[in-house]
Image (tube, helix red, strand yellow):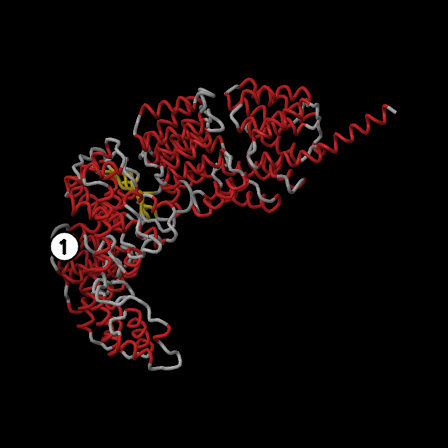
Amino acid sequence: MVAVLNAQQIDLEKIFEERNLGPVGELLARGEYDLVARIGEAAAEKGLKAPEWRLYRLKALVEMGQIETALDESRKALVLFPGHFELLMLRHDFARMLGKADVMAEAMNALNEAAKAKPAKDRTALENVMLGKAALVLGADAQKVIAQYFKVAQSKEAKLEAAYLAEGRLALEKDDAKRAADVFRAGLKAHGETAALRLGLAEAFRSSDREKAAENLAKALELNPHLHAAHLLRAELLIGGEKFVEAEAAVQQVLDLDEQNPLAWSLRAVVAHLFHADPKKVEAARAEALKRWERNPEVDHTIGRCLSRAYRFAESAGHQRKALEFDPKYLPAKVQLCHDLLRLGEEEEAWKLAAAIRTEDGYNIQAHNLGLLEKEMSGYVTKTFPDFTLKMPKRDWPIYGERALALLRDAKAVLTVKYGLDLKRPVLVEFFGAQQDFAIRTFGALGGQGMLGVCFGTVVTMNSPGSLAHGRNNWESTLWHEFCHVITLSVTKNRMPRWLSEGISVYEERQRDPAWGMSMDATFREMVLDEENETLTPVSRLSGAFMNPETQDHLMFAYFESSQVVEYLLETYGKEKFQGILRDLADGKRINDAIAENTADMEEVEKGFTKFITGRAKGFGAKAEWNEPKPEDLNPFDDGSFATFLKEHPKNLPATRKYAAEMVSQKNWPEVVRTADILIDLLPGDFSDESGYSLKVMALRQLKREDDEIAVLRQIAAKSSSAQSAFLRLIELDLPKQRWTEVKANAQRATALNPFLVTPQRALAESHSALKENAEAIAAYERVLILDPGSAAQTHFKLAALLRETDATRARRHLLDSLALAPRNRAGLAMLRDWK
């Protein structure tokens, strides 16, 4: 009878555990840590046998910051469950958080022995995950671990969240964000929604898709409002957006549960550095971060990584070196230091470090990419001068290298004086022939499509003017823009918000050439006047406009608005007050305080700027009626209703544009010209492809009114830096008339968009030659010789003629090369006879 009761008692206990372990696990997943810890404690006191009670309690204790208690209880749990794979792995992790190397080694040895005692075929999916994690700790090849442990676990138990988390986290550690995203998505599909999987997906998207990152982060916090890692990621993103008060609040949510959380204190140190500019607060926060483990390399690595994102590369490098002093094998610090060194221009040390990382870790994507980049750049030409060092593909230097150097020196001469900077060290400027190489050098990973250049202080990286990223963008204005960043970042010691840095650079583009930079257009006008959606960002919050723009137009508007703020401050308060803002930033003041100190109360500044930019927006197309015709104004069944509306509303812009399009479709070119003139009158400042000017050029060309076409084309060329079709058409029309000054001007404009085009380079050579600018003509013909080998015979002859009086040896060589290609060239033969 007693035996039967015991059996029944065991069955009841088993049933109780089966019914209650799941709900308790759900409580843990929702962040009910204190409740789960108390339930686990009660279960242990009552002698419940399932190890999950202890596991749940240990995980809850760790989330509440009770690491010492968790470590101690893990030892006691292992007495009851010797050789339990997950308990041993947790014990190792707890010991690592506290820096207890002996306990870590002991746990690994015990797990190794447990694995030997259990054949592979008998291991559960979760046990395979734990063994995979242990193998990584012991230095096993990551790809083999994925194949032999994590994938095996997923095949054994498709719904096991831990298997997807382990593989996804490993991919993130190796900077393989794409793989990580795929794994986390697969986990969500197999297991269903969990905060940890959503957080992993947010981290995978943080660099490539901010919108998806924010969406997944919000979902993770919805599933578990107390998930530490989610709050810490949110704090990092807020720091990146210069929303420091909100970041502090996110950090505090972690500290409310775990008052010694090292990463939370690390981020607090970052805020103290970037927002408070208080070294004492920085050191105090760092000291708190190291309380739990005084040699924790993750602390300095985290501080430095966040500082690096704020362009504090030297400070970041210092923190990475401190992290490596604590743990010379800590790979995240090595990878970050490698990027910091590249951004500081210390390339030789960076390449060596990247090679060492590849030796240690064959899976690290960033180190692998840097190896490919180093190999590619080994074939680059390097030109070193006292003021600049330029690196670019060998084919690029003879095409635009000298022009780039001249432009940089011009920018230095203008901007250093203007901003009172004595730039002592040479600036490194690198041009990349392939967008992927630019991305790896600049961001450490593929991506960055659409970006033309980036400045890191005294290092500038650019897409080559011949790459796919160029052609529609003016590389000369981009280079001027980036060098302006060199000046302003140096003046402020890298302590300026992004909006101000970008705003000054765009403003200085316009100062250099009114056709450069960004001007008011129809899109910006609409965004300025869009009161419903409040697209215009208050000056005090302008950094946020760059953080998560809704569209590419919104990002471009952030650049435009920032440049307008700069112009407003300079026009309203003067150059000295504006430079006072920059000086205060260098001294560590916050941007809003610096503006208020040197100009006026921020509320007054914002009101004044809103009036300023609104006036400009209303002034753009002030004569035009911008509203679309209402449906009741047009009768779709009456062909004459549109004409009637336009007659009654001759200044309605949408209707006029629609009418112009109809006239084009009917090839009624005289009427197109008339309508284009109306559009020009309504929008005299619009030189876009949709402008009245472009429409008029099309019609005049069809009507063969060449002189009138040229006049309009000249207006476009003077006002737009990207009107390549206008530049080339003007070259085509001016060359036969030998209008050499105009040919030269438009050839220079065309090569500022793409110096690899043969037509403008040849036009440049011919115009220089005709204007007796022989040195420039020789350089241009040498470029043509490279770009158009098919016309080499003629080009060699031209060079021979230009060089004959100043360099007979070179001239003779070019002449002989010309005759070798075209032996019947009478002019060449005559020149050779003259030489004899």
Q: How many labels does the image show?
A: 1
Q: Locate residue 210, reporting x and y percent.
A: 43, 46
Q: Mark yes or no: residue 526 visible.
A: yes
Front-lying residue, 811 or 392: 392
Q: In which quarter of the image is residue 615?
A: bottom left
Q: Locate residue 818, reporting x and y percent.
A: 24, 59
Task: Please name the residue shown 26% across and 66% down the image.
Answer: 691
Front-lying residue, 575 or 404: 575
Name the amino acid type tagged 1.
Asn
Task: Please name the residue shown 39% across and 33% down the image.
Answer: 248
| Quadrant where the image shows the N terminus | top right
* 130 left or right of 545 in image: right
Badge 1 crowding class, 10 Å Cα cut-off, few under 14, some 14 to 19, many 20 or more, is some
Front-lying residue, 327 or 804: 327
Q: Mark yes or no: residue 786 visible.
A: no
Q: In this view, does 281 lie above or below 824?
A: above
Q: Locate residue 249, reporting x and y percent.
A: 41, 34
Name the residue that disc number 1 marks. 774
Residue ranking furthest to the right: 1
Q: Locate residue 247, reporting x and y percent.
A: 39, 36
Q: In this view, does 396 lie above or below 101?
A: below
Q: Is mark 1 on a helix, strand or loop?
A: helix
Q: In which quarter of the image is residue 836?
A: bottom left
Q: In this view, does 737 lie above or below 130?
A: below
Task: Please name the residue shown 44% across and 47% down the image.
Answer: 209
Front-lying residue, 371 or 44: 44
* 94 left or right of 430 in image: right
